Each structure stands twice: as structure tokens, then as C-alpha cells.
Amino acid sequence: MSLSKDTLQVPGFLANGIHVGIKAEGKKDLALLFSTVPSKAVGMFTTNSFKAAPVLIDMEKIESGVAQAILTNSGNANAATGAEGYRDGLATSRIAADGLHIADELVLVASTGIIGQPLPVDKIAGGIGRLVAGLSPQGFTAAEEAIMTTDKFPKIALRKGIIGRKEVTLCGLAKGAGMICPNMATMLAFFVTDADVDASALRSLFRHSVDKTFNAITVDGCMSTNDTVLLLANGIAGNRTVRNGSRAYALFREMLLETMIELSQAIVSDGEGATKVIDVNVTGASSIAEAKKAAYAVANSNLVKTAFFGGDPNWGRIISALGSAGVRMVADSVTVHFEDVAVFAAGMGVRGVEEKLAGIMTSPCIRLRVDLAAGERSFRVLASDLGFDYIKINAHYHT
Amino acid sequence: MSLSKDTLQVPGFLANGIHVGIKAEGKKDLALLFSTVPSKAVGMFTTNSFKAAPVLIDMEKIESGVAQAILTNSGNANAATGAEGYRDGLATSRIAADGLHIADELVLVASTGIIGQPLPVDKIAGGIGRLVAGLSPQGFTAAEEAIMTTDKFPKIALRKGIIGRKEVTLCGLAKGAGMICPNMATMLAFFVTDADVDASALRSLFRHSVDKTFNAITVDGCMSTNDTVLLLANGIAGNRTVRNGSRAYALFREMLLETMIELSQAIVSDGEGATKVIDVNVTGASSIAEAKKAAYAVANSNLVKTAFFGGDPNWGRIISALGSAGVRMVADSVTVHFEDVAVFAAGMGVRGVEEKLAGIMTSPCIRLRVDLAAGERSFRVLASDLGFDYIKINAHYHT
């Protein structure tokens, strides 16, 4: 579906994004998502030991299971800013709450950008009146623009579905994970829906979908101090409440998973300097943890990533990465496929497949299948390749 | 000490390196190290699940604790070659044994180069007569040349010491670990000494030194199918036997450790595309395993490595990498130093150190100190930075 400002609406939600002076050159840097009524809310956050102030604040607030607004600034991560940063984060949440005339507890905050610099609270305070006044049902594209940093394109997904004759809408906004300018990889993704979903169902749906998507992508194996995924469900659609185990549950989970797949794939495609997406599917593992370890060993291998950048179907690097992952496998029974072409089996390379592989390597997305022959578990991860632009972007920015 | 052919000798050892046609353009590709008498022998090998045939062969042979020769070819790794590769590896060891008129059990083998291609046994067989005939006490530089692949410079270290009035000599040859041409990172290092060392002392000395050196370097976090470190001690010096706990033990350990430090640092300096060595020292960990995990998280972070390449003292990337390592730390008490300059403490960046850091970043080797404030254990790892040439070398080689 084409996403114009007019189709991009979710009943009961308003949004806006403006420039308040945190980023240079008039670029939008402050976003607000607002539900006209308090929403059920769930979130997942970075497990980095150095969590940014907004992450610490949201982790506490989300415990209540209720929220009504998400205030996000770009250009400053409010990370590695100590107790001062925590106070600053709380101050901006109060500023938004006052502007919206809602309780402070209902405002979540997120930040992305430079780390180790004090958050410019005054700029945010100075802009809040304008930000709130401009809230509109058509404001999602402006909000998306205001959370982007080095993203080359906006990442918005929309799905509609019917639950018991009522139409429900789900919209997701995301920003990229490619070691975003200037200091580190921050991935932010916000989902809002008018569906009425039971709190327990919401939590399980959300966790399931995040694990299959945002927790299964890698650009450079780095996890930032600010990574945040939030979902607000305000129930305005008036559908029969989605509960665990119901048919509506399966339907809504499908909607959520689809939007998350779309946005997480967009993040990988937009990885800094990326020219190809590598879809690594490890099967035959003795546990999901082992499958994940093997998949990430391949997906994060610089040797594998540079080979894909160079268009080289270098299976030797794949088995070398696999072999060093420290996971259970039956080495002589391990198989590796590029798409449907077997390249490694019985401990040896398969001969005579060079021509087929050359064709496959020209594709922008290449599926790798690795069977460890040690069990029944699997894990799939999307990775970007590694090229000159990654170095250019990350070596030549000076704080 | 300057290492001319004449100073580079170890009593009782002969060496040679020649071209037999495995590599192109007449480059040396077959090396032999030979002890005139059977030597005590110890080895450590890659833990990769896909071990190359020569690794599997040596792991069996080294069990006896005795060896007399090491035959190494470059240009072909004899890896991912299945049962055929194993037979080929055994065949070359027999060829060398016949040429040297010693028992097959006394010949160790090593290979480095292209993987997945049959070992050209006939070329090795055809050259063995010439290789053996050319063995000489001055042959170490030729042997080194024949084990190199994409190494930009030879890596040879020599140490002499006095044990109970007898002079003992130790010589090490190594080739680099920078995802060596064309398929993967192979690190080979061979040490020969005329010292008389008790078998148990030799094992503990060797393991201790390898763990502190070759097991503590990283170019790109990849471990190859062929990594091998071997040590032969033939006892020709006639010194009083070095035993566990003796003064001679400490002296010889120092000699071995020094040569290993020298060669492992040379490997990092010669990492593909490397312009800087990053010396990461993690202290205050609750266990050595945790210290190691944290040190490698920093040393293998592409964000950290590209920052160093760009001369950017980006401590934000260091704490982000640390924070995602999943190790115990007291986040508010963690400190990070560049050389003697504190850059991160009390959860925040240290202000006003930019000028000092700019000076430090121009050095070819930069020491990072990270204190996790969670215990007493430490681990140190040497890493190379990540620049354009890494991509160039690894993306643009096609098998």
C-alpha cells in the first residue's frame, strides 16, 4: 500500500516532528507520538551495561503497562551522561507531560545521537509548545523524519486487519542500526495500534515478534546504549479484546510480525555502506541458543561480509566462521547452501557450481542455509555486507 | 640483534625453503625444518570444528612428544578436502620422511593457502629431493619465506641465553593471521631450540607462553582451520635439563615468551590493512574468562577499530562494546584510559582531555586500559585497526 500522509493514520493517535536546534541545518530533531487516551504499553530495551538515561527512565515507567506519549529527540543520545543525564531525561518527560496536560508517568522518552554530551533541555523546552500545537493524525512522516540520524530513507510500515468486523490499524516507525552517526548504533522502533489487546497477550505478542525480527538482525554486531522498541495499543478500534490463544491473537500477531519484519529488513538494507542483505538460516542445531550463536558467527564475520561485498561466493570463510563458533555440529555432515545450490557437503566443497553461484551473487539479498546436523533447532538472522563506505562513515567522523 | 643468515642459526637444526610450483611466479612455497636428532615436541592447534588435514595429522603425531622435522607448504591449505585431503597430508609426510631417511612418525606437516582444493602431492614429491639437499644451518630465512602468504614482511625472532654455563639458542618463525590470502586467516608459528628441557616443563612453558601471546591477538576475530604453533627442543646444547620450578625454567620461559611476544606483535602489525596496534588491557574483572570476553569485545568491535583507523579517540564506542559483552562490571565505577589519560569515569566522559588524546592517537601503538571494578582478574589482547585496505584485500579476491 502506498503510504501517503493521508493513508498513514491510526485512529486515536496524533504525531508531529519539528526542528528545535539539536541537529544542525534545520533538520527535524524532536518527535512526539500521542494517544488521545491512555494506552496499554510494552517495551524492550538494550541489554548493554551502559544504558542511556532515557532507557533507564522508560524501563521504570513501562512497568505500569500504561503510557500515552513518546517524546524522542535525535542529535543527542543522552548516554554516558551520569546522574545529570538521568535528571535531564526526567525533565524533558515532565516538559512534554505539561505541554500535553497529562500525567508525567504516561510519557516515555527516547534519544539518539552524540553520546557523552549534556542533553539540551532548554531547546526541547523551547520547542514543546510548537510540537504539541502541530500534533495531527497526518503527523507520522514528520515524526519519522525527526527520529532519523544517518538513515538514508524513512522506515514506516502500516497494516490493517479485521478483528470481529472492526478494522484495526497498526503503524510502525523505525530508525536504523548501522552504527548510527556519530558514536554508535542506535535502533529505535515505535509501534502504535488502535486495537484492543489484553495486557498479557500484548506482552507475549510483542516479545515473540521482537525476538524474530529486531533481535535477529546485525549490521556490525554492536548493540547500542539506546536501543528501544515500544508498542502502544489504545483500544480505540472497539474490537473484541484480543486474548491469548484466540483467532484474533494469531491475526494480530501476524500483523505485528509483518510490520516488524518490514522495518527490521529496512534497517539492515540501510546499514552503513551496505550493498547486500545476507539472510543466514542455521538449521540442525542442538538448541536455539546454539543455532543463534552459529548464525551470528557467520553474520558478524568480517571475512564473510567482505566476500559478499566483493561478490565472492567464498564458502571457505563461512565454514571457518562456523567452525570457530564453538557450537555442536557433525563436521562431516554439515551442509552449506547458497539459495538452493549446495556448496559444501561431506567435509568438502561441491565442485562445478561456480556458474550458478556467480548468478546468485548478483542478487541484493542472498539466502544462506547452514545445516549443522546436530539437532532440530534453527535460527535466522539478517546481516548486511561490509564495504568501503562503512569504513568511510565510521573512520572519518571525529567527535 | 640483527638477524643475518649467519647469526640466525640454532645448533643441530637445518632449514630450507624452495619453490615447487604451488604458488605462482616462482615464489617459495615449500619449507622444511629439520633437527639432526629426534627432538622433544609440543604443539597447540586451532579449535575450529573444521580442522584442516595437517592439523588432524599433527594432533595425533604430537601425542608421542617426539618429532624431528616440520614440512610446510604455502599456497594450498589442504582444508575442507575430506578424507582425500587427510590421505594427501599423510602422503607428503611420508615423502619427507623418505627424503630425510627418518621414521614417518617424526615428521609434522603444516599447510596454508587456498582451501577446498586438492593438495598437489606430486609437486611436493617432485621437489623433496631438492628441498632436502639444500638443508643448511643458514636456511631459516628461506624457510620463513616459503611459509609466508600475504605477509608484508618476514617474522623471525632469535634469543640466546646461558643455562648453567651452556649457551642455548631459540629461534621462531611465523606467518601472519590477517585472513591470509585468499580464503582465511592462517597463523603458523614454529619454534626450535637446542636447549635440553624436560618434557613436562616444555609443555607447561609452551602452553603458558602461547596463551599470553598467540592466543591473545586478534586481527578480525576469525580463527582459521589451519592455525598451528609447534616447538621442537633437541637438547644439543647439553645444558643441565630445564625442569619445572628451577631457575633455568624461569630463564627459558622468559626467552620463549619474549620471542612469542615479538612474533605475535609482528602478526598484528602486519594484519591486513592495519595501520595501528591497539593494546587492550582489561583489569578488575571477576574472572580471567570475563576479562578475556571484555577485552575481545573491544578488540573485535568494528566501530572501535574504524575509530582508531580514523585517529578518533572515540571512548563512546569502547564503552558501548564493553557494555554489550555481557560481563560483570560496576557500570558507575568503570574507568577507561588511553595511555595514562582517563577518558571515562563515574559513568561519564572526562572533559578537557581532547588535546592530550589527539597526541596519543598519532602513535602506531596505543594502550587502552579498562577497569571493570568487579574483581581482581585481567586479560590483555593486541588488536589491529580496520581500514580501507582490509576491505580491498578481502573483498576483491575471488576464488
Image (cartoon, coloured by chain):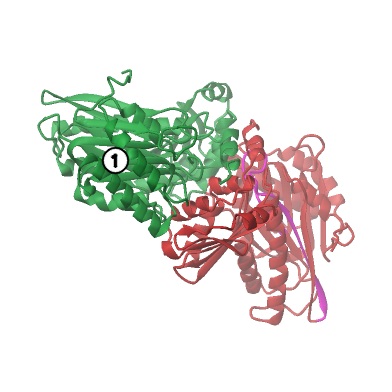
Chain colours: A green, B red
Is B310 left, or right, of A334 in this rendering?
A: right
Instruction: Out of A210 and B168, give the one closest to the viewer.
Output: A210
Q: Which residue is drawn at 35% across and 45% down?
A: A288
Can the viewer see residue B65? Answer: yes
SS at badge 1: strand
Is B67 left, or right, of B340 in this rendering?
A: right
Q: In this view, does A344 lie above or below B359?
A: above
Question: Where's residue B42, x and y in %?
Answer: 65, 63
Question: Where's residue A85, x and y in %?
Answer: 39, 54
Q: Is residue B179 magenta?
A: yes
Question: Where's residue B124, x and y in %?
Answer: 75, 42
Q: In this view, does A197 lie above or below B200?
A: above
Residue at the extreme right: B6
Q: Name the residue under label 1.
A: A70
Q: Residue at x 61, y 68 (%)?
A: B208
Can the viewer see residue A291? Answer: no
Tell me the magenta residue range.
Answer: B165-190
Residue B382 is drawn in which quadrant?
Answer: bottom right
Quadrant of the image for the N terminus of chain A? top left
Residue B79 is drawn in which quadrant?
Answer: top right
Q: Residue at x 31, y 52 (%)?
A: A57
Instruction: Out of B230 and B66, give the one closest to the viewer.
Output: B230
Is B395 left, or right, of A125 in this rendering?
A: right
Q: Is residue A393 above or below residue A77?
A: above
Q: Does the magenta stretch include residue A350?
A: no
Tell me the chain of label 1: A
Residue A167 is drawn in which quadrant?
Answer: top left
Q: Which amino acid type corresponds to the residue marked 1 in the rendered image?
A: Ile
Instruction: Out of A38 and A51, give the one closest to the viewer.
Output: A38
Question: Where's residue A344, x and y in %?
Answer: 52, 34
Number of other residues with Cα within 10 Å of mark 1, as a class: few under 14, some 14 to 19, many 20 or more: many
